[in-house]
Image (cartoon, rainbow, N blue to C red):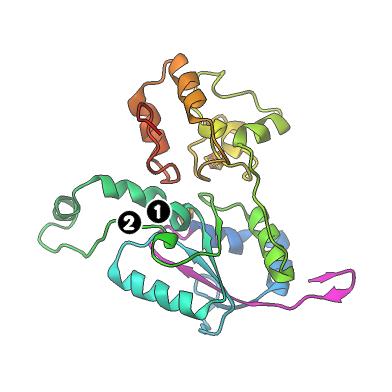
Amino acid sequence: MRYLNIGARHPRVGVFDFTDCEGCQLQLANKEETLVAFLQAVEVVNFREIATDASDDYEIAFVEGAISRSDEVERLKKIRERAGVLVALGSCACFGGVNRMKNAFDLDEANAEVYGGTPKETLPVRSVKEVVPVDLEIPGCPVSKDEVERIVRHLVLEVPFSFHAYPVCVECKQRFTTCLMERGQLCLGLITRAGCEAPCPAGGLGCWGCRGPAEAPNYEEFFALAKERGFGEAEINERLGFFGGFEGIKVGEAR
Ligand code: SF4
Ligand code: SF4
């Protein structure tokens, strides 16, 4: 990458996955129009999804996935020791993601139900920051490749990055999407951090909050608006609990 004809350094990068679907890594690998520029900006030394060579000599580690087994805890700690900068990539890594719903069940019972007489080790799901210190979190299920590219540029040039403080609603207005709440759907865009460019409402689906809370979300006003439109507490709480980003937030409970 060159800017004003000044060559930037190319940090060595590793990309690692834990309990997840690997969809965020795929986002990095599948946007072909910018893949060459991305690979010129960094030196990828460990990225199982796209390369067979694997080195432990990396400066920046992108960690995708939630942590749900003891071997994952040990592996993550080793990655943390080696990496100068550790970035949590995607909602699984940032919040536990959809995996976090597992924590609402008795794990022994669930294990027996799924695996019968051959139970598998499974711990309550944790986000990456609940296990090791994290330098930067990039939320999204999956992450937005455009946003990741912007953040990589900041990391390469060592310039701090700030996320939007405002909610997804603002991005709906920017792209002239009719409000889904006005069309009778429940939508978490009022309280969810922007940055995805609101693809779900634009496609006719209310936001499920995969990017977690915006800065200073007005929960009481959101709950009042949702109830006014006939949505019940169970439905609102189910939506809030889906990606793990609103952990501890429930309608009808004091904050
Ligand atoms: S955040 Fe979503 S897309 Fe990314 S790994 Fe988790 S489930 Fe997959
Ligand atoms: S609109 Fe909501 S659910 Fe859809 S990508 Fe954005 S934050 Fe995630």
Dot 1 or dot 2: first in sequence order is: 1
Q: Is residue 242 above or below residue 201?
A: below
1 and 2 marks in contact (CB < 8 Å): yes
Question: Does the stretch in magenta take in 206?
Answer: no
Q: How crowded is mark 2: few (under 14 residues within 10 Å), some or many (20 or more)?
A: many
- In the picture, which quadrant includes the C terminus? top left
Visible residue check, residue 175: no
- Residue drawn where x is 73% and y is 64% of the image: 159
How many labels, in total? 2
Q: In this view, does 180 lie above or below 78?
A: above
The residues tagged by marks 1 and 2 sit, at their Cα atoms, a distance apart of 6 Å
Q: Is residue 186 above or below residue 46?
A: above
The residue tagged 2 is 125
The residue tagged 1 is 96
The picture places residue 107, in percent across and down from the top left corner, at: 20, 53
Q: What stretch is highlighted in magenta?
A: 1-22
- Residue drawn where x is 58% and y is 32% of the image: 201
Report the side of 252 relative to 63 (left or right). Answer: left
The picture places residue 184, in percent across and down from the top left corner, at: 50, 18
